[in-house]
Image (tube, rainbow, N blue to C red):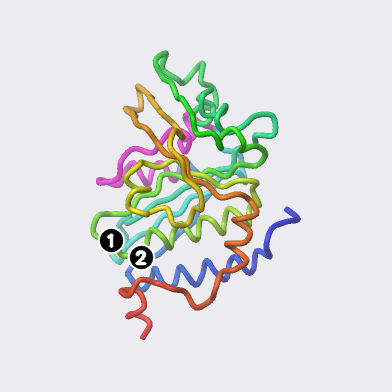
Amino acid sequence: MTHALNPLQVSRFVQLHDDVAAHDGVKLFMGFDFHEYVSITRATPTKGPTFPNFRPNRSLIKSGQGYWIIGVDRNNEVALSDAARLYELSQSNFAEYLESLKAFYSHPAIHAHPQDRCACTAPNAKKMTGKVAYTGDLWVRGDLRGGGIAQIVERIAHRVAFAMWAPDFLCALVARWRVDKGNVAQYRHHEPGGAMLQLIEEDILGDYWLIWLTGAELRSQVEHMRTELILPSRFRQHNR
């Protein structure tokens, strides 16, 4: 990981954001065991199902190639979640990986339903090769939405991904409404056609946009992090 920023610098930034989240009554935890992650998210009443690419019974995540973040409130109830994993695509590209369903299942021939399919028409997905960090399963409980905590978690996720992997690309698949509402500010690029996805047994049917950063853009984002954060007013008021 010769191109990665000093992990101590990343840890310092993560701690700053964790402290800010704590002011809103949310404590953040990070983990690497996705069996534990699924057991937590399944027991969270208002969170939707986790996609199969973050469920180890459907998709193997090797040690060091994935992590998750969980936030709990003052009552120790789950208030948010996020997850990321690394795809090694030196012999392929992200579009091909999606369309083969290998992005979702380690063994599509075993785990996929015969009618499962994914079409990726986003032109830049075919250019994503090498180490591709994929973030997903971002969820914030209803009473905390709109206050900026989702952006805090995404900043942490980006910096941890950079510290762990220094990927060639960092990307996500999101619903169009997130793009229309400007909820993808952490990513510099977006385009439609990321995944027209149907997973029968997962009850997943959707048309997702591709959002992404190049590795150089991610490095720049991390290296220009500031200790004095520009935060929503509700967080700044806690620090006065």
Residue type at mark 2? Val
Q: Residues within 10 Å of mark 2 (few under 14, many from 20)?
A: many
Q: Secondary structure at mark 1?
A: helix
Answer with the quarter of the image where residue 12 lies.
bottom right
In the rendered structure, does residue 62 fall within the stretch colored magenta? no
Task: Name the quarter where the C terminus is drawn.
Answer: bottom left
Residue type at mark 1? Leu
The residue drawn where x is 76% and y is 55% is 2
The residue drawn where x is 57% and y is 57% is 160
The residue drawn where x is 48% and y is 35% is 53
* Residue segment shown in magenta: 36-59
Image height check: is 230 above or below 88? below
What's the mark number on residue 118? none
Image height check: is 45 above or below 122? below
The reply to whether callout 1 and callout 2 are in contact (CB within 8 Å) is yes
Tag count: 2
Q: Residue 143: horizontal and vertical position, in percent?
A: 23, 59
Q: Which residue has dot 1 on it?
A: 144
In the rendered structure, does residue 43 fall within the stretch colored magenta? yes
What's the mark number on residue 26? 2
Residue nearest the observer in this picture, 55 or 187? 187
